[in-house]
Structure formats: C-alpha cells, structure tokens
Image (tube, grey):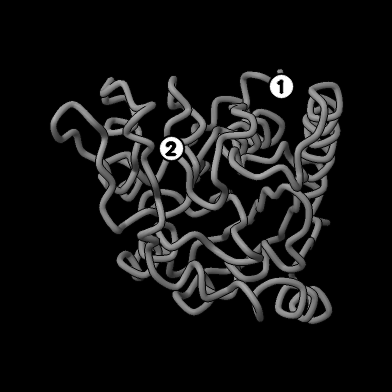
Amino acid sequence: MIGIYFSGTGNTKYCVEKFLEAYEAGARAFSIEEDCALRNIEAHEEIVLGYPVQYSTVPKILRDYITAHQSAWKGKKVFVIATMGLFSGDGAGVLARLLQKNGAVITGGLHLRMPDSICDEKVLKKPLSKNRLLVKKAELKIRKAAGRLKNGRPPRDGLGFGSRLAGFFGQRLYFGHKTKAYSAQLRIDTGKCVGCGKCVGLCPMKNLRLDGGKAVPDSRCTMCYRCINECPAQAITLLGKEVVEQGGIGKYL
C-alpha cells in the first residue's frame, strides 16, 4: 500500500501517514504535488487517499488531479480518508464516486475530525487542549480502521446513500459552488506584508508572486489555507477579514 494526499495545514498528511504506520510498516505517503506521486499510483494496486473536506466536497486541486490522470486509477483499490473541522456528511463518499467514475474500486472510507484550519474565522475555533484531544481521538480511530481493513471489515464512513443526502443538504446545496472554480478572493494586507516570499513558495497553485516587495495574489486559490496559516505577518485572509488563529498540525502534537 501507498498513501496519496493533498494537505493544506498538515492534518491530512499526518492522518495518512498514521494510517500507513498502522497498516503496513515501511509504506510511504506522497503528496499530489510531488512529481513521483503519479508514478507511484500507477505502480501500486492498493492506495489510501486522503484529503481535507471543503463544503462537503473535494478541493478543486485534487479533483483536477484525479481527472487529469483518469487512467491511473483504473482497477486501483482505494481507501478514502476525509479530514474535517466539524461535518461533511459524505466526505469520503464524494471522492469515492469520482474515483469510481475513473475505474477505481473503493475499499472503505474514514472520516476524521481534526483541528480547524480556517485561520480567519472564529466559528470552529477550540482551545489548544481540545484540539490536542481531537488529534488523539483521530489517532485511535485511525488505528482501529487500519486493523479493520486488514481483517476485511473496513469502515465505510460517508459511503452510504444517507450520508450522501446529509452532505448535499448539509452543505453542498448551499456552498458547493465555491469549489467548482478556483477562488479569486485571497486578499493581502499590504500594510502588514513584509515581502518575505514565504507564501509564494508554499502555494500549491503558484497563485502568489512578489511585486514591488509585496505579495500579490492571482485568481487560482484552491482554499487550502496554507499561506494564511504560515504567513509570519498574518497579512493574508480569504473567508474572514483578519487572522484569528494560525495552527499547523505541529501545534497539536
């Protein structure tokens, strides 16, 4: 087995790696941003694929990646991990359906509550102690899920029809349009920006550049929150008007 993931602030990467540790010693995980990821997908039959849910659906960067490499998924046995701040309904299911269209066989699904990564909104913020507890609970659930997959009884979080209805009526019906195209809503506070260029290097879409000593966004943001989470000057926002709390996975371990 190998792991494939897209991860913004590190939650999904961490979960996929923990799953592999429990399932098969020495198994490796690769980001879709790595050049070798596609070669490894093509070379392995069994894959665990992880992603962070956005509005009960798949980030555009991952959806485009799967669609661009349709033939690579044919016949692959894929276990889907969906990470989320609160609720997704069918987070695993919505990705599973896309993979099935491209010939994959879905072996199971796992939903994992993790610390919220939306740095510029207060709605899902929790104390540090509660976020650390969330991660511990996720680790336990991961170990159990890996064991169940080994024993031929994998969890099927988000794969049923009821979950599909919950995901659609819970979020996608109202907000699903936000992930159909890349966003042009990323904002830079030029008064705060120090021109360090860290965001430019972090962006998976190459959506940021330096111009006149300041970061400048384009219109291809995939809403991963990586740049907002890592900006040392807290100068970047997307959904909210100011950064409330930054927190990559390392903060909660």
Residue 72 quadrant = bottom left
Q: Nearer the viewer, mark 1 or mark 2?
A: 2
Left/right of residue 127 with respect to residue 90 in the rendered view: right
Q: Is residue 148 above or below residue 232?
A: below
Q: CA distance from mark 1 to mark 2?
A: 22 Å
Which residue corresponds to the image point at 59% horizontal and 41% vertical from the top-left? 120
Which residue corresponds to the image point at 55% horizontal and 38% vertical from the top-left? 242
Left/right of residue 203 with respect to residue 46 in the rendered view: left
Q: Identity of the amino acid at label 1?
A: Tyr
Q: Which residue is mark 2?
A: 236
Q: Which mark is residue 252?
A: 1
Q: Secondary structure at mark 2?
A: strand
State the image coordinates of residue 114 (x, y, percent, origin top left): 73, 39
Q: Which mark is residue 35?
A: none
Q: Is residue 240 above or below residue 179?
A: above
Residue 142 quadrant = top right
Quarter in which the N terminus is drawn: top right
Q: Earlier in the sequence, mark 1 or mark 2?
A: 2
Left/right of residue 54 with respect to residue 148 in the rendered view: left
Q: Identity of the amino acid at label 2?
A: Ile
